Image (cartoon, rainbow, N blue to C red):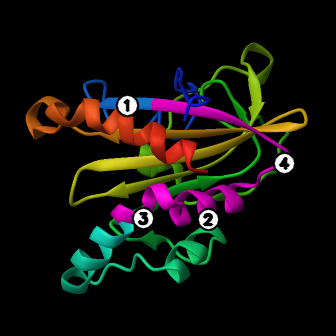
Amino acid sequence: MTDVTACELPEGSLLARYGGPGDYRDCFSREVPGEVSLEQYIERFYSSMAFAPERLILGLIGHAKGWDASADAFRALARGEADRFGAWEVIDRRSGLVAEHGERPASHKGVVSSSSEAIGQQECPPASEAQIYESDQILLLSKDTNTASWLSVQPQGANTKLLFGSWVGGIDQSGWRVMLTPHVWYSRVLLGGC
């Protein structure tokens, strides 16, 4: 967990563009050796020992609500074969180059799965004026808790930067603010477990 750091949320990320200005967002990063795909990261994240207590709780709750927190469910999510996992539903999933303000450079022919209208896409300056970075990312929303989770991988030469972020809508009205200290600790543990 010592190599997990809090960081600025990349401006062009799906999480940075989701929700409204009064919502809570955070971001944590960890650099790992080698090349890690988004699929591998999702599977490692949800199958880690750090996520085991949450999988157990989701499994117990799931019997009443039809949620599936099984290994098969998160593997299907990782491979892009499912759009739900546990309490979360995929809002957007993207691969490829991203401009600083979130819009894909016009010359890029990457894959976009899900509509950007769902997250209120903003106008972007021309790619020549924006910082371009490579990022594969997924944004998952839990409507029941009004929270979202974001996972992203960014190549860093011989390493990969793993990013994990969270969103809470209307944090002051929701009562979630009292959970921020444990949430930050748990986020670091989760990312450190990958």
Residue marked by disc 4: 35
Q: How busy is the neighbourhood of tag 1: few (under 14 within 10 Å), some, or many (20 plus)?
A: many
Foreground pick, 132 / 177: 177
The first of marks 4 and 1 along the sequence is 1
Distance of mark 2 from mark 1, alpha carbons?
23 Å
Select label 3 or label 2 by which is in front.
3
Q: Secondary structure at mark 2?
A: helix
Q: Is residue 184 left or right of residue 11?
A: left
The first of marks 4 and 3 along the sequence is 4
The first of marks 1 and 3 along the sequence is 1
Q: Secondary structure at mark 3?
A: helix
The first of marks 3 and 2 along the sequence is 2
**Which amino acid, by three-letter code, is at mark 2?**
Glu
Q: How busy is the neighbourhood of tag 4: few (under 14 within 10 Å), some, or many (20 plus)?
A: some
The first of marks 2 and 4 along the sequence is 4
Q: Is residue 173 left or right of residue 54?
A: left
**Which amino acid, by three-letter code, is at mark 3?**
Ala
Q: Quadrant of residue 126?
A: top right
Select label 4 or label 3 by which is in front.
3
Q: How busy is the neighbourhood of tag 2: few (under 14 within 10 Å), some, or many (20 plus)?
A: many
- How many numbered marks have been drawn onto this rendered protein structure? 4
Q: Secondary structure at mark 4?
A: loop
Please give the name of the residue rendered at 44% of the width and 59% of the height, measured from the top-left corner. 51
Residue marked by disc 1: 25
Residue marked by disc 2: 43
Q: Which residues are magenta?
A: 27-54
| Residue 120 in view, yes or no | no
Select label 1 or label 3 by which is in front.
3
Distance of mark 3 from mark 2, alpha carbons?
13 Å
